Image: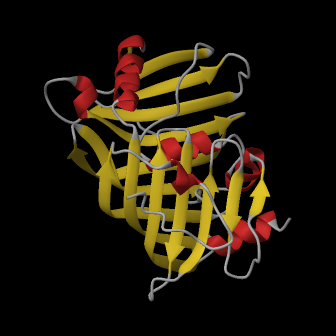
Amino acid sequence: MKVSRLFVLVALSFLFACSPLKPEIFTIPVPAGPLIHELERHRQSFSSLKGVAHVEIKKRGQKRTFDIVAIVVDDQHRFRIEAYGPLGQSLMAVVWNGKEVLALLPDEDKVVRTEPAGLQNLLGQGLEPSELCAVLSGNIPTLDEAIAASQRCNPEGACILELRDNRNDDVVRRIKVVNAGSGSTAQNLQILTYELYRSNKLLFRTRFGRVEKILHYLLPMQIEIENPDKNLVLTVVYNDVELNSPVNDEVFTLADEPEDSTGK
């Protein structure tokens, strides 16, 4: 299978590169349990996303844009991403149906299938399709009991939550958050950055910006994802978004003839 060529052509490298952020000083250690609880409440308040986005991709000084990209996310279980040309023609479609990744390109005469690990290898070590779902919805992956957590905050109220996998101690996730308002923390919890490290090496970083509250859920309308190794930068800017509405199972199928991916 032409998996590498496939994802280069469709420009679905959702992890991209730029210089590291300058370190910030977080001097106050606090218990991590309450923040983990609020992050879980935030995650549970999201069930689905149907959006139309503008996507810009930069790679080693070269830039490519897609003005119309339909994105459908079903919690952290499934996704569909489809780019369209100026005349409404489908340029590509990529689907994760929960079991395998399916892709269809104009120059391919059949659907290309690969295991989820194939997507992980192309988009960044440690990245799983469910993690991509989380990023596209301005969230973090579901946490399990094998996580050791610590948290430090600065005087301005921003906090860094560090999650270390007890089964693989060199895998670390860091999430920077702020409380964007008063009242229930889960409804005002804004995730600013999400990073994945392995052996102290940054594998990818996601920045969330232009946050809007939709159905009591803080959704970043602009998502920037970086991967230092690939020297790639991707920016997704949502133009129109619908949250927490039913999604048809047919959206996460892919035939030789591309289907409408709006899910409506």
- Given the current orientation, which residue lies at the most extreme right position? 1
| Residue at 43% across, 62% down | 236
Q: Position of residue 162 (x, y in %)?
A: 51, 25
Quadrant including the C terminus? bottom left
102 lies left or right of 262: right
Relative to 90, 228 lies left or right:
right
- Residue 243 visible in the snapshot: yes
Q: Is residue 242 above or below residue 146?
A: below
Judging depth in this view, the residue of 243 and 248 nearest the camera is 248
What is the quadrant of residue 152 in the picture?
Answer: top left
- Quadrant housing the N terminus: bottom right
Q: Nearer the viewer, residue 123 or 70?
A: 70
Judging depth in this view, the residue of 27 and 211 nearest the camera is 211
Which residue is drawn at the image coordinates 31% and 57% (left, top)? 241
Q: Quadrant of residue 156?
A: top left
Task: State whether residue 159 appears in this view.
Answer: no
Q: In the drawing, does residue 104 fall left or right of residue 154?
A: right
Looking at the image, the residue that sits furthest to the left is 182
Q: How many marks?
A: 0
- Residue farthest bottom in this picture: 87
Percent from the top left, x then y, of residue 62? 59, 80
Q: Is residue 94 above or below residue 216?
A: below
Residue shown at the point (72%, 46%) measured from the top left: 116
User: x and y percent of residue 225 in the render?
Assistant: 52, 55
> x, y (%) of residue 45?
33, 31
Determine the residue positioned at 69% across, 40% down.
Answer: 126
